[in-house]
């Protein structure tokens, strides 16, 4: 009996093993049929262990998952893995229903259905919707790198439109800076430029898409654009974002598009170099040559402020592009354990992928070392002890640079600060850099904004303690602007928390409109200040003209023998002017 029962047991076990192997092979071949929720007849559903909190919730009675709209869920593409993965979505990459902070996943959804539901509406596919579907490519002038229909003919024409909308305005702006000798590094502009650059990049009201504007108001995106468009001028982004999304290459991926934006950041320097070359090659011969030389020599005096403007505006642009390239995209399983890390805007690239490192990460780190770190270190190293040692030690540097020339350049940034506080010019650059390091290194948006809050608060404390400016009122202006930035950031954290905890939308909506008023306040104050200065300038010129007219009338009366103590009326003045014009002599 024991022998028979053992034989039956072995036979049953063998059949079970064979069936399991067959089912396993079939499931591997037909992996698209792997459901996200397994329905069990008459007993509801079985929900996997889930440690993601409100990000992903499972209802066993209805066999459904509910996912926050700013998150992605799916499987590893190109594999037969049935492990569910979850990650935060970059802005504009994933599904948004426009009315609710969460949406329901279909019962027994396959991987193709999930991909189509979450990524398909944005013409995307793949891991964290990181790829554009066939026939589309990322737009170069879209903040969200929207995937648009693209053909080789369209790409060539769109590239021309993009050059006209971006590079031509940049050329005109820097020519205006050179011709009119505009200085952007004066005291009143310091804090406002930092504010405009940060608010239009890492401190945005949308938390880079983690706050869906459609939940706030149908017109919220227009409100955001109303301040981002003018503020983006200080990020060297002019009219490109006002155009429809433009594809300039059918084979370009998102990382290629981001890397191409380095050209926008370096373009002003190329303009300055071109003018310097013209000055070196000038030939003041002939009438036209003399006129050209006179114009170029006037421009020569403006090259230093123009170079300072390039460093000020391009520095932030370089930082932001570098942060976008190296920002990580952590991908978790349902237990909230990290499974892998990819590039944030192109999740098809793992951070250790050889192609990603060689083509994108390595050039970015070289830019960070040679440009992004060098400028604040030199400004912090007052009075240039470290820089002077390098110049003296390396003869190749002393041939092209001198300590006096570097002091002249740095004084453009440091001149408005007290002599023992000149290093604060470097602190403004370090504040920018620390913001983007936080942007590129934190795993979640909430953590990023909390860290940024500490950075801004710390900088406010430094300003309040040291009062670095020579002009006392500039200290209070900077404290006001950075305090405004801190409150704006607090409201962003509140709105993100409110939406994640499914708090009433009305509270988040009220906070958003307060936040919007804070965002535009410095810009409105700047416009008012410029209008006031313009009014004073017009009034001054008008008074000078009136004084000149009065002086001319007195001289005419004196020549005519009239008494200035008893001036004539307007009709008599008109007769005098008419006679003077026609060369007649007035006889009293």
Image (spheres, helix red, strand yellow):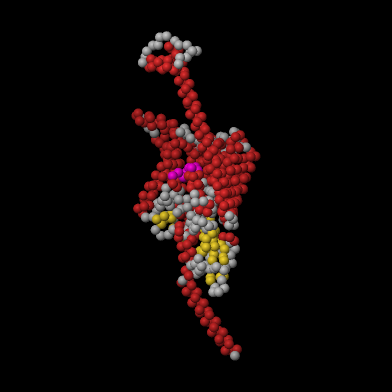
Residue 106 placement (x, y as % from top left): 50, 66
Question: Can see residue 61?
Answer: yes
Q: Measuring 53% from the left and 38% from the top, which residue is drawn there?
A: 526
**Observer-nearest of 559 and 413:** 559
Residue range in magenta is 230-239
**Rendered-image quadrant of the N terminus:** bottom right
Asked if the magenta segment contains residue 237, the reply would be: yes
**Rendered-image quadrant of the C terminus:** top left
Q: Is residue 18 above or below residue 520?
A: below
Please state the total of marks drawn on the protein image.
0
Q: Measuring 52% from the left and 36% from the top, which residue is drawn there?
A: 528
Question: In the current view of this chain or complex, which residue is farthest to the bottom?
Answer: 1
**Observer-nearest of 486 and 317:** 486
Residue 128 placement (x, y as % from top left): 50, 59
Residue 255 placement (x, y as % from top left): 46, 54
Question: Can see residue 396?
Answer: no
Q: Main secondary structure of the magenta part?
A: helix
């Amino acid at each position: 009996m024991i022998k028979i029962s053992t034989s039956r047991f072995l036979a049953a076990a063998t059949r079970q093993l064979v069936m399991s192997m067959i089912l396993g092979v079939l499931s591997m071949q037909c992996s698209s049929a792997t459901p996200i929720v397994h329905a069990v007849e008459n007993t509801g559903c079985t929900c996997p262990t889930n440690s993601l909190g409100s990000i992903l919730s499972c209802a066993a009675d209805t066999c459904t998952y509910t996912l926050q709209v700013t998150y992605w869920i799916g499987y590893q593409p190109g594999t037969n893995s049935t492990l569910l993965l979850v990650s935060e979505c970059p802005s504009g990459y994933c599904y948004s229903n426009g009315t609710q902070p969460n949406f329901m996943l279909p019962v027994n959804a396959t991987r193709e259905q999930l991909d189509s539901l979450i990524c398909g509406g944005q013409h995307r596919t793949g891991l964290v919707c990181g790829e554009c579907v066939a026939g589309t490519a990322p737009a170069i002038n879209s903040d969200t790198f929207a995937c648009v229909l693209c053909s080789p003919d369209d790409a060539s024409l769109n590239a021309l439109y993009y050059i006209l909308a971006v590079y031509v305005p940049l050329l005109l702006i820097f020519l205006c800076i050179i011709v009119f000798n505009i200085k952007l590094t004066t005291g009143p502009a310091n804090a406002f430029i930092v504010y405009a650059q940060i608010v239009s990049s890492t401190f945005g009201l949308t938390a880079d898409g983690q706050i869906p504007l459609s939940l706030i108001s149908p017109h919220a995106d227009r409100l955001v654009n109303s301040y981002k468009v003018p503020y983006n001028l200080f990020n060297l982004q002019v009219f490109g974002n006002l155009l429809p999304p433009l594809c300039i290459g059918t084979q370009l991926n998102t990382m290629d598009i981001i890397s191409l934006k380095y050209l926008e950041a370096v373009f002003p320097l190329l303009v300055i170099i071109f003018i310097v070359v013209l000055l070196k090659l000038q030939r003041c011969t002939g009438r036209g040559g003399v006129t050209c030389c006179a114009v170029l020599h006037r421009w020569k005096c403006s090259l230093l402020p123009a170079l300072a403007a390039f460093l000020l505006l391009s520095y932030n642009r370089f930082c932001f592009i570098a942060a976008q390239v190296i920002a990580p995209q952590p991908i978790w399983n349902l237990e909230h354990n990290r499974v892998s890390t990819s590039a944030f805007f192109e999740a098809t690239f793992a951070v250790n992928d050889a192609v990603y490192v060689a083509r994108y990460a390595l050039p970015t780190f070289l830019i960070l070392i040679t440009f992004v770190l060098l400028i604040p270190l030199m400004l912090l190293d007052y009075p240039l002890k470290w820089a002077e040692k390098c110049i003296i030690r390396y003869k190749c540097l002393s041939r092209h640079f001198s300590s006096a020339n570097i002091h002249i350049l740095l004084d453009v940034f440091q001149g408005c600060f007290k002599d023992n506080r000149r290093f604060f010019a470097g602190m403004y650059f370090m504040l920018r850099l620390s913001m983007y390091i936080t942007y590129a290194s934190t795993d979640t948006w909430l953590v990023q904004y909390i860290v940024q809050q500490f950075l801004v608060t710390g900088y406010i404390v430094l300003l309040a303690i040291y009062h670095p400016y020579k002009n006392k009122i500039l200290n209070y202006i900077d404290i006001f602007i950075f305090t405004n930035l801190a409150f704006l950031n607090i409201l962003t954290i509140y709105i993100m928390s409110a939406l994640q905890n499914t708090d009433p939308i009305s509270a988040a909506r009220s906070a958003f409109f307060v936040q919007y008023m804070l965002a535009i306040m410095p810009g409105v104050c700047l416009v008012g200040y410029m209008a006031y200065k313009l009014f004073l300038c017009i009034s001054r010129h008008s008074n000078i003209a009136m004084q000149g007219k009065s002086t001319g009338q007195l001289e005419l009366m004196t020549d005519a023998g009239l008494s200035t103590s008893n001036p004539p009326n307007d009709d008599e003045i008109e007769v005098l002017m008419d006679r003077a014009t026609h060369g007649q002599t007035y006889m009293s």
